[in-house]
Amino acid sequence: MIAKVSCAALMGIDAFKVELEVDFSRSGMPAFIMVGLAEGAVREAKERVFSALKNCGFKVPPARITVNLAPADIRKEGSAYDLPLALSILCAMGILEEEKVNGWYMAGELSLTGELKSVPGVLPLALAARENAGTGLIVPAANGSEAAVVNELPVIAARDLGQVVRFLLDEEELEPATVNIDTLWSDRQSFLSDFAEVKGQEHAKRAIEIAAAGGHNLLFIGPPGSGKTMLAKRIPTVLPPLRFDEALEVTKIYSVAGQLPKDRALMVTRPFRTPHHTISDVGLIGGGRYPQPGETSLAHRGVLFLDEMPEFKKNVLEVLRQPLEDGEVSISRSLMTLKYPADVMLVAAMNPCPCGYLTDDTHPCECTPAAVGRYRSRISGPLLDRIDLQVDVPAVPYEDLKKTKSDIDSATMRERISRARKVQEERYADLPILTNSELEGSAQEKYCKVGETEHDFLRQAVESLGLSARAYTRVLRIARTIADLEGVENIAADHLAEAINYRTMDRQG
């Protein structure tokens, strides 16, 4: 007898429907054959499933069992096929009627006792089930709240295989899992830090405000102890809250990567990722034998902070160039090409020289010009061009240190940033962009117009500083954001001057 159940496989951060077919035949030599490009964990499902069936009281007689995972030309991996395989075998044996499982999508790893364990990628599975007009979704209890974020789809969260069978046989009633989206938003993380705690560095705070308002990349350059890391770690406190569609995007990435916190059904705060400088290029942008999202994708819609940027391997930094330009990571393999979202605000920090004290008046610098040049050359020109704001962060004077708190706090900055973001949202309502940092081509020409006086000013700056074409467009985008923060429509010369002032590395060149 042949039985079919519906499940799903992951491709990138999205799921597509997979039909798991089982042919159970008592004729011929007993065997278990699985086809359909099943990887290691999927092939090992046989041992887990047979033990779970036995320990839940279901006896599987000797038979020739053929399993097909269709479409058969796309690789399947992971342990989420355990539950659909067990149920399809029960259907093929006649214990369950196939009509009972028709339309239900399911996923779950089985222990040898039949207990259902959580699996990654349940949110994309739930979205795929809704898109394909599924009857509902059956998942482990630990994945119930994550799947329930997708409304209009009944989600059955079960403890073990026996409970699923009893539910399908109408012997046990299970209430669909629910989650209160409004409660999730109200439970957003309250930040324990604030920009009011950062004494001095008003110039850097202004740069952060501009970067956050326009979604621009930012580089801090200053001696050790000047507060570069402290400033970066407080950036999430001023970023606008995630919209629901953005929260779904971020949650899908964390779900696929298996990094969704157990107590969180939805990522409701913007990510802040701080990879160590020993990270590999695969760890940073994703990939591997079985591709997974990297730190850049895990920071999607949030902040990717690279502390001590020149300490990262040069080849690792260079792989950031394409994601920073396109807002996504493309991973090509012989059988497929995957794309992971990677729309991040890159924030980096570095010393001005190997010892760190080149710009510090209180500490002598012993680095030679050649050593300084080698140190800064670890960050290539094309990568620097993609960092919109390059800001000096000098050592904090004692007069600022003795202050009890700063005059600028996160709440004030966040209000101004949110107002500027609202202006951009309305301006680009008919375009597939959200912030000024994404402007290019005809859209940039339209929304970053400047007058003759401003053109003359820009011409002098480009010629004297030797700005590249990419740096020129960065200056215009930053000026557009500064104008938005001031609530004015036209870009003025003082906006351009401030924007150029944030191109520290260009001015030093």
Image: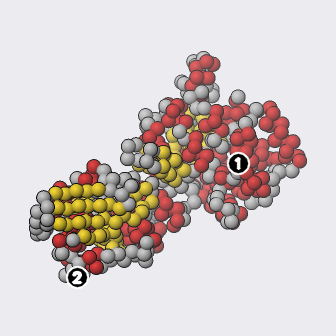
Indicate the position of residue 457 as horizontal and vertical percent values.
Answer: 84, 41
Which of pointers 1 and 2 indicates the residue nearer the eye?
A: 2
Asked whether the residues under the numbered discs 1 and 2 touch, taking CB atoms below 8 Å apart as contact, a structural biologist would say: no
Left or right of residue 208, residue 95 in this image? left
Amino acid type at circle 2 is Asp
- Up/down of 214 relative to 177, above or below: above
- Say which residue appears at 68% left-offset and 35% top-offset: 504
Task: For residue 228, say whether it is visible.
Answer: no
Left or right of residue 14, residue 309 in this image? right
Q: Secondary structure at mark 2?
A: loop
Residue receiving disc 2: 170
Asked whether 414 or 103 is in front, the reply is: 103
Indicate the position of residue 126 as horizontal and vertical percent values.
Answer: 40, 68
- Say which residue appears at 57% left-offset and 50% top-offset: 327
Asked whether 387 or 66 is in front, the reply is: 66
Task: For residue 425, say whether it is visible.
Answer: yes
- Say which residue appears at 25% left-offset and 56% top-offset: 34
Q: Residues within 10 Å of mark 1 (few under 14, many from 20)?
A: many
Left or right of residue 42, residue 279 in this image? right
Indicate the position of residue 311 as horizontal and vertical percent values.
Answer: 50, 31
- Say which residue appears at 74% left-offset and 60% top-offset: 487
Residue receiving disc 1: 478
Asked whether 457 or 257 is in front, the reply is: 257
In the rendered structure, which disc, 1 or 2, sits on the residue that comes first in sequence? 2
Left or right of residue 328, residue 35 in this image? left
Q: Residues within 10 Å of mark 2 (few under 14, many from 20)?
A: few
Asked whether 92 or 446 is in front, the reply is: 92
Amino acid type at circle 1 is Ile
Residue at the far front in the pictured view = 28
- Quarter holding residue 390: top right
